Amino acid sequence: MEPGRKAGLLLFEAESGACSSPRRGSAVGEVGRGQRRCLGQVLRLDQGDAMAKVVSVASKLRRDRARRLRRDQTDAEARLWEALRAGRLGGWKWRRQAPVGPFIVDFLCLEAALAVELDGAIHLDQAEHDARREAYLRVRGLQVLRFWNAEVSDDLERVCQTILSACCESDPRRCGKRIDRRA
């Protein structure tokens, strides 16, 4: 194997502007200003910087899926988002359909390290997946609150009070420090 080449990795040579890969015949082409595409990954180039940032295909797919989920939200998600957005609930900043590692959480407050999940009928069949997801989020330092869609529709005020109390009880040692949601 040639020096500077590792199996399965994409390398960008800043001096020559060439993109190489372990496989011959890779599709290399201009993507946009300051970017090049190599085997399904995008290298972002900073002007005057020899370092390139590799954005994996998986992270782009996760981002696109989160965007699609934000666009196609359920009625319960829309109602809760109206209550949470723009600091309407105690001044806490929320994100909706936010990627956290390999998962996408319905609502995320980084300052309180709190994730809120709304469950519909489909979650009755995927309890094991939900348990793995919740364990992953807890390891990342997030407290997870789960509500059924019917709870949000029937008693939004109680759901908001539960969320607000969980935000206020978040770890005071954190002092507003944000958690890292990328893995």
Image (spheres, rainbow, N blue to C red):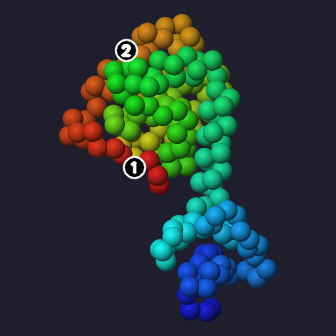
Q: Amino acid at mark 1?
A: Asp
Disc 1 target residue: 180
Up-down relation of residue 2 to residue 73 (above or below):
below
Question: Helix, strand, or loop for circle 1?
Answer: loop
The 10 Å Cα crowd at callout 2, few under 14, some 14 to 19, many 20 or more, is few
118 or 32: which is nearer to us? 32
Question: Helix, strand, or loop for circle 2?
Answer: helix
Q: Amino acid at mark 2?
A: Gln
Answer whether residue 39 is visible to the viewer in this image. Answer: no
The 10 Å Cα crowd at callout 1, few under 14, some 14 to 19, many 20 or more, is few
Q: Residue at x 34, y 44 (%)?
A: 178
Q: Residue at x 36, y 28 (%)?
A: 92
Image coordinates of residue 78 in percent, x first then y, are 58, 20
Pick whichever of labels 1 and 2 is earlier in the sequence: 2
Q: Residue at x 57, y 32 (%)?
A: 127
Image-based side of 43 in relation to 90, left or right: right
Quarter holding the N terminus?
bottom right
Residue 114, quarter of picture: top left
Tag shown at residue 43: none
User: Which residue is farthest top?
Assistant: 154
Up-down relation of residue 47 to residue 6 (above or below):
above
Image coordinates of residue 70 in percent, x first then y, are 62, 32
Q: Residue at x 55, y 49 (%)?
A: 102
The answer for how far apart the CA atoms under marks 1 and 2 are is: 26 Å
Disc 2 target residue: 161
116 or 33: which is nearer to us? 33
User: Which residue is farthest left?
Assistant: 173
